[in-house]
Image (tube, rainbow, N blue to C red):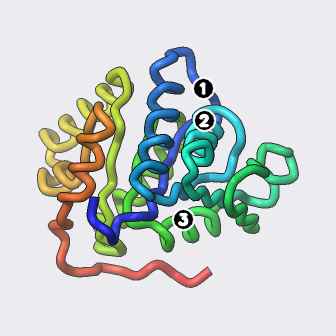
Amino acid sequence: MSNDLKNIVVFCASSSGNDPAFVEAARDLGSTLAARGCTLIYGGGNVGLMGTVADAVMTGGGRVVGIIPHGLEQREVAHRGVSELVVVNSMHERKKQMAERADAFVALPGGYGTMEEIMEVITWAQLGIHRCPCAFLNVAGYYDAFFTFLDHACESGLLKKQYREMILVENEIDRLFDSIAAYESPIKDQWIELPES
């Protein structure tokens, strides 16, 4: 991984799911981030896959920045054992701060929140707002049906092939990091800028 790809945003579930492979992948990803000297930037929770990946980075001697809205922090799901916990006022501010700090985005298995977060940054990449790689760690084929849908969107003429190909998909962590390091954005022009919040 190149030296300018050190801050990795990870989107993932606040539950652990019912496949042990999900927790194992979150733990392995966290350990790998720490071993590679990367900082984990994530949603600040101490539960589910979020807590697992953060704990693994901390156990490996790495740095973890959690960014969490005040409402969730008040419900006692904030991870108090991370390197830095940033409490913000809204989900929008959380996502904006995560994006501003990111060199790359990675999605582990997750539900609505994970999908909304990774799809937003993919859309921003399409619009040229950022040029960071957006990747899925496709644990146990979790996202296979979603990628089939994206292929269908291409076939239906509603998603251009070049934008479909922007998404990095790997099922092994080392290959994921190789793909992230090799990524070059195909988007040369910035269409719009993010509004100030």
The amino acid on which the numbered mark 1 sits, given as a three-letter code, is Ser
160 vs 175, left or right, is left
Q: Mark 2 and 1 residues: CB-CB less than 8 Å, in contact?
A: yes
Q: From mark 3 to mark 1, how far is it between C-alphas?
A: 22 Å
Residue 132: give x, y in percent of width and height: 32, 65
Residue wearing tag 3: 98
Above or below 184: residue 44: above
Bin the neighbour count of mark 1 within 10 Å (Cα to Cα): few under 14, some 14-19, many 20 and up: many
The amino acid on which the numbered mark 2 sits, given as a three-letter code, is Thr
Q: Which comes sooner in the sequence, label 2 or label 1?
A: 1
The N terminus: image quadrant: bottom left
Which numbered mark, 2 or 1, is in the foreground of this view? 2
Q: Which comes sooner in the sequence, label 3 or label 2?
A: 2
Above or below 17: residue 168: below
Task: Residue at 44%, 58% (x, y): give it.
Answer: 37
Task: Residue at 66%, 60% (x, y): give it.
Answer: 67
18 vs 162, left or right, is right
Residue 115: give x, y in percent of width and height: 47, 43
Mark 1, secondary structure of its residue: loop
Q: From mark 2 to mark 1, how far is it between C-alphas?
A: 9 Å
Task: Residue at 35%, 37% (x, y): give it.
Answer: 137
Q: Which mark is residue 52?
A: 2
Between residues 91 and 99, which one lies in front from this camera angle?
99
Q: From mark 3 to mark 2, how far is it between C-alphas?
A: 19 Å
Residue wearing tag 1: 16
Q: Which comes sooner in the sequence, label 3 or label 1?
A: 1
